[in-house]
Amino acid sequence: IAGSSQFSNVYSCVNRGNVESTKQTAAGILGYNFIQGNIANCQNYGEIKAKTYQAAGILGFATTWYRNNSTYTIAVTRCTNYGKCTAGGNAAAGIVGYTENENNVHKLIIDRCINAKGADITAPTHSGGILGCQQGYYNWCRTDIKNSENHATVTGTGKNTSIGGICGGMLRHSQSQGVYIWNCYNDGNVVYS
């Protein structure tokens, strides 16, 4: 639907086409969201492929990076992915591929989202049903995943892989609050191959 956005809202959009990036960041609804935004009631049915990093059904790359003390949030709510997502490098997921939170008052919220059965997720590492990878640069950065479900197979193909039914994994450059997961459900297989 959109390649990149900042301070924007995306509501009730549907993607049915396949999306392929020859480099990085591919997604069905929004490739890259910067600083603040809301994505709600969106669905992806297309197959998503990124040759290197960040492939996701709804949002490929989310960053709240902005060096001041304003409170910025990116929220992804009531979205569903039905398409397979594959990254050649790392960070693939049904809902958000990769998030980078760089200030102590910034966060990403994923709430009431579903990665449907058959929407299989594959990457060498940081492969997750809902979120692929969270990275925080400063203390108290946070990502919340709430009331969300994964029903698809999640596969990690790398030598030192990090995979999960809900969240693939974390990277961080300093202390952070990391990822909070509440009331989530996974019945998809989690496979290291």
Image (spheres, helix red, strand yellow):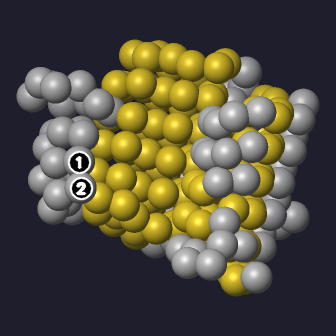
Q: Image point 16% across, 48% down: which residue? A: 138
**Residue 46 drawn at (x, y percent):** 87, 40
**Residue 4 drawn at (x, y percent):** 57, 19
Residue type highlighted by circle 2: His
Task: Give above or below for 63 relative to 113.
Answer: above
Residue type highlighted by circle 1: Tyr
Q: Image point 75% across, 43% down: which residue? A: 51
Left or right placement of residue 56 versus residue 61 in this view: right
Work out which residue is located at the far left of the displayed protein and give it. 69
Quarter of the rendering occupied by the N terminus: top right
Task: Give above or below for 118 relative to 6.
Answer: below
User: Could you say which quadrant of the image residue 106 lies in?
Assistant: top left
Task: Give above or below for 143 relative to 33.
Answer: below
Q: What residue did someone put label 1 on?
A: 137
* Disc 2 residue crowd, few under 14, some 14–19, many 20+, Cα 10 Å: few
Element assignment for label 1 = loop
User: Could you say which quadrant of the image residue 73 lies in?
Assistant: top left
Q: What residue did someone put label 2 on?
A: 173
Quarter of the rendering occupied by the C terminus: bottom right
**Residue 146 drawn at (x, y percent):** 44, 60
Left or right placement of residue 37 versus residue 138 in this view: right
Task: Give above or below for 90 relative to 32.
Answer: below
Left or right placement of residue 95 versus residue 88 in this view: left
- The number of numbered discs placed on residues in the rendered structure image is 2
Q: Is residue 28 visible?
A: yes
